[in-house]
């Protein structure tokens, strides 16, 4: 992948406009915005008040945090690579074309055990789809903050 620096935190590839800040989206851009994360990136493909569709690309050996969302459910469909998924108490290994549904309030995590990137399409449905609707329980990148937030409010 060829990266061309545009401004601090922004990069153009042959497929995506990448940004380290989700707030840098230019609604007039012809390129989808990919937001960089320690585990890879995500690109919002479509968004309405009641649903959001993302492409999520997880680097080889990387993982998303063990997390839950209060206001949205998610449906993940693997489109490249392999995904080890914790969905509540279930542990799944999803191949290309396989999927899982994660209800609001359910703890979940995705791990890419492979040597290549894992890509999935995520469909979020709910009353609030903001990136701040996330409660992290474990994270290999140090993004879990000490909190009692869930002691009285998480499902």
Image: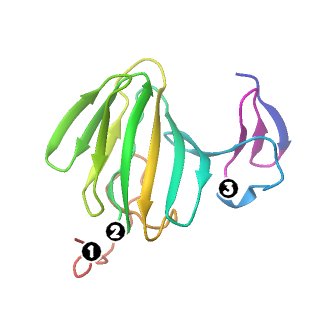
Q: Quadrant of residue 137?
A: bottom left
14 in the magenta segment? yes
Q: Which residue is mark 1?
A: 150
Give the mark nearest the N terminus, 2 or 1: 2
Q: Relative to residue 12, is residue 154 depicted above or below?
A: below
Left or right, residue 125 beside residue 154: right
Other-residue count near label 2 (Cα within 10 Å), few / some / many at <14 / 14–19 / ≥20: some
- Is residue 46 in the magenta section? no
In the picture as drawn, the residue positioned furthest to the bottom comes out as: 152
Taking depth in this image into account, of 69 and 103 the one nearest to the observer is: 103
Q: How far apart are labels 3 and 1 at the CA level?
A: 27 Å
- The circle drawn on residue 70 is 2
Q: CA–CA distance between discs 3 and 2?
A: 23 Å
At 23% from the left and 82% from the top, the residue drawn is: 152
Residue on which the image places disc 3: 21
x, y percent for residue 50 = 49, 64
Residue shown at 37%/51% (left/top)? Answer: 74
Q: Position of residue 54 (x, y in %)?
A: 53, 45
Q: Which-is-in-front pick, marks 2 and 1? A: 2
For residue 118, what is the image quadrant? top left
**Range of magenta residues:** 7-20
Front position in the image: 56 or 128:
128
Q: Residue furthest top?
A: 115
Is the residue under label 2 in contact with that under label 3 (CB below 8 Å)? no
- In screen coordinates, is 54 left or right of 120? right
> What percent of the width, then of the height, locates residue 98?
32, 28
């Amino acid at each position: 992948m060829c990266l061309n620096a545009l401004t601090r935190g922004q990069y153009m590839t042959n497929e995506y406009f990448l940004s380290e800040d989700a707030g840098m989206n230019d609604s007039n851009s012809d390129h989808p915005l990919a937001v960089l994360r320690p585990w890879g990136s995500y690109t919002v493909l479509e968004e309405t008040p009641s649903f959001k569709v993302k492409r999520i690309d997880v680097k080889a050996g990387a993982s998303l945090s063990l997390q839950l969302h209060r206001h949205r459910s998610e449906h993940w469909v693997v489109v490249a690579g392999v995904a080890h998924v914790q969905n509540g108490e279930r542990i799944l290994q999803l191949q290309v074309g396989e999927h899982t549904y994660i209800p609001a309030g359910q703890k979940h995590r995705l791990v890419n055990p492979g040597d290549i990137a894992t890509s999935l399409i995520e469909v979020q449905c709910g009353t609030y789809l903001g990136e701040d609707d996330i409660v992290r329980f474990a994270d290999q990148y140090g993004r879990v903050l000490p909190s009692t937030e869930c002691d009285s409010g998480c499902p």
